[in-house]
Image (cartoon, rainbow, N blue to C red):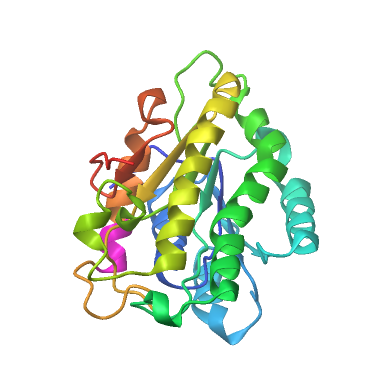
Amino acid sequence: MSLKLGGNILVTGSNRGIGLELVKQLAEKTGQDTHIYACCREPEGASAKELRELSTQHAGKITLIKLDITNEASISAAVQAVSKQIGAGGLNLLINNAAINKPAAPAPLSVTGKKDMMDVYETNVVGPFLLAKVFLQLLQTAAESENDRGGDMSCRRSAIINISTLISSIEKCPETFTAAPLYPYRISKAGLNMLTRCQAENFKGHNILVTAIHPGWVRTDMGGEMAPLNTHDSVLGMLGVMSSLSSKDSGMLVDWEGNRIPW
């Protein structure tokens, strides 16, 4: 499968789960013009061992970037590191994948406290907000590149993908709540959806596409062993969807198969 993706791509939370699989499939399925900036908190730590091995397998195509999206100094350092390497092409695709869930599922009201709410909001909403803000100039540069000038919005041109979830849907809450209350997580992802909508409006004049994608219920540390989807199939679907997105999809929430999800 060849993807209609390429250029400079940045992925957060890339040391495990969906993020690691995104880096893996992007490295395998995109052309030689692609460079992937794989971000995680401790790229030299034990938790990033598989990511380092992947980087070695695809030497010259993956750059590991130290990034803690809750730390503004870390964000600034990451932007500087990417900017030095990225060149005149700008940043074509920012995938905001990093997220946390506290307390552990099912996270009912009785065990959820203020710190849980604030920590999850900071990572799942404020982090993507700050990253889009600091990388906006590089995204604009990509959108304005000579080769693509005058074309439609796309993830190959310039885009932000915010990884969201079905349980962020307010309309579908009655269907999903009992199985997984997850107060901090679902509320933060509803906030991420609004951020997606706001960014789509804010950045449309720059021809930057912004879409939220639900990856499905995936077998990861967060999703658990009962989840029906593995990371390979989820990411394969999402990358196919990203390849097909255009201006009509900006500001929308879709799933890994391209189906729209109501807010």
Left/right placement of residue 60 relative to residue 105 reads right
Left/right placement of residue 65 relative to residue 7 reads right
On the image, which quarter does residue 28 sit in? bottom left
Q: Residue at x 35, y 41 (%)?
A: 253
* Front residue (pair 87, 163): 163
Q: Residue at x 29, y 73 (%)?
A: 219
Q: Is residue 163 magenta?
A: no
- Magenta range is 230-235
* Front residue (pair 25, 224): 224
Secondary structure mostly seen in the magenta stretch: helix
In the image, residue 168 above or below residue 120: above
Q: Is residue 231 magenta?
A: yes
Q: Pinpoint residue 141: horizontal percent, then vertical percent.
A: 67, 29
Q: Residue at x 36, y 30 (%)?
A: 249
Left/right placement of residue 241 relative to residue 160 reads left
Q: Pinpoint residue 205: horizontal percent, then vertical percent.
A: 59, 19
* Front residue (pair 14, 211): 211
* Front residue (pair 42, 215): 215
Q: Pinpoint residue 143: horizontal percent, then vertical percent.
A: 59, 26
Residue 61 in view:
yes
Q: Residue furthest bottom?
A: 46
